[in-house]
Image: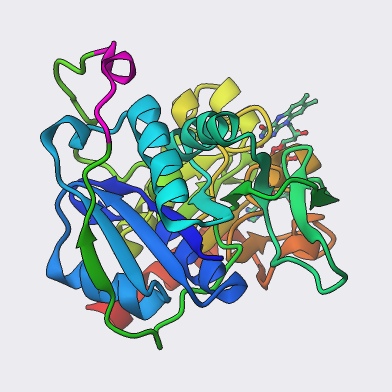
Amino acid sequence: MATLVFLEIDEGSVKKSSFEAISYASAINAETTAVAFGDLSADDLAKIGKAGATKLLHVTDAPFAQPNSMAYASALAEAMEKTGADTLVLAKSSLGDAIAARTSVKLSASLISNVTSLPGEEGGFSVRKSIYTGKAFANTQSVTSRRVLTLRKNAALIREDGQTVAVEGFQPTVRDADFNVKVLSREKATGEILLPEADIVVSGGRGMKGPENWNLIEGLAQALGAATGCSKPVSDMDWRPHREHVGQTGLKVAPSLYIAVGISGAIQHLAGVNSSKYILVINKDPEAPFFKAADYGVVGDAFEVLPRLTEAVKAQLG
Ligand SMILES: Cc1cc2nc3c(=O)[nH]c(=O)nc-3n(C[C@H](O)[C@H](O)[C@H](O)COP(=O)(O)OP(=O)(O)OC[C@H]3O[C@@H](n4cnc5c(N)ncnc54)[C@H](O)[C@@H]3O)c2cc1C
């Protein structure tokens, strides 16, 4: 049985989380087929093979050029039948979630979302998933012959030792009912790095004392090419816009590196950041709860640490 992986393409590039999905799928089954809709760069094609896909079903037909969860779900269900695959893996995202739900209904397959582990050895198909906005885990078992999994960001390391992927054109059936909403235009916020997609996030809390000090957060973010975030009280007090509020009631982020400055590490804040690959905490209180969730910690005054860290980053990165 093969394993199928949906590749999400954003701004012409395959998302990092989709490469994680390929590597995860290839650890379940060496016969991993990726499915991509739209143009792919030569660089991405090479990375798809290196990440572990052995075959790529490439859809280039015009109706599938715009992201469309209904059409993509129909096409993926068709690809599952065509390849005889028993498992479909998608990276968790708003598009991935919508496609996963629809595809599982079409295939009468079980759906396990927010998966964080490879299937266990104990027989059946059992995986761990993150629940309660990342505050707990559940052990789950798929009891159907086919299954759809959405993978939490940073749940798998991206392989780089795979081979060249074999590319095959795939023309899914075009169903009018899947195209009942037309996208007339797309406008994207420009000039800043969007938080949910950022690879590095520098986030400030009440320990920054006031909005007049955010130049220190922005300075480090700029030096690192990072997005800026904040804790809830910071946005409640209008020090920062609400779109930067990270946590249980704000945005969930999953960067490679989350830098928390002057944030205590309340459970509601951690719920938004605990999918991060690495967490660096800067706090003057050595007892701050955030240090328990941190990979790296600096006990110090943010107003002394940030300027020195920013200068060091600039010197290192040029
Ligand atoms: C239902 C509910 C939902 C919530 N949802 C969210 C959410 O989504 N996101 C969220 O963030 N919060 C949320 N909260 C609030 C949460 O419980 C905390 O109150 C909040 O996260 C605290 O923000 P903070 O860490 O910025 O401030 P504080 O708790 O005041 O912590 C400030 C930290 O800064 C440190 N500090 C002070 N001065 C310095 C300095 N000079 N240098 C370095 N460190 C310094 C202090 O040691 C302290 O650890 C929610 C609460 C509830 C009840």
Q: Where is residue 256 drawn, in percent x and y? A: 49, 64
Locate residue 67: give its quadrant. Answer: top left
The reply, left or right, for residue 173 in relation to residue 27 is: left
- The magenta span reads 173-181
Residue at horizontal 29 percent and vertical 22 percent from the top = 175
Taking depth in this image into account, of 265 and 190 the one nearest to the observer is 190
Q: Where is residue 190 drawn, in percent x and y? A: 20, 36
* 168 magenta-colored: no
Q: Residue furthest top?
A: 180
Quadrant in which ligand 1 is drawn: top right
Quadrant containing the N terminus is bottom right
Q: How many marks?
A: 0
Quadrant containing the C terminus is bottom left
The reply, left or right, for residue 296 in relation to residue 259 is: right
Q: How is the image coloured?
A: rainbow
Residue at horizontal 80 percent and vertical 59 percent from the top = 126
Q: Where is residue 88 drawn, in percent x and y? A: 53, 52
Locate residue 18: give its quadrant. Answer: bottom left
Residue 132 visible, this angle:
yes
The reply, left or right, for residue 311 in relation to residue 190 is: right
Q: Where is residue 132 drawn, in percent x and y? A: 79, 37
Residue 216 visible, this angle:
no
Residue at horizontal 76 percent and vertical 58 percent from the top = 127
Residue at horizontal 64 percent and vertical 48 percent from the top = 146
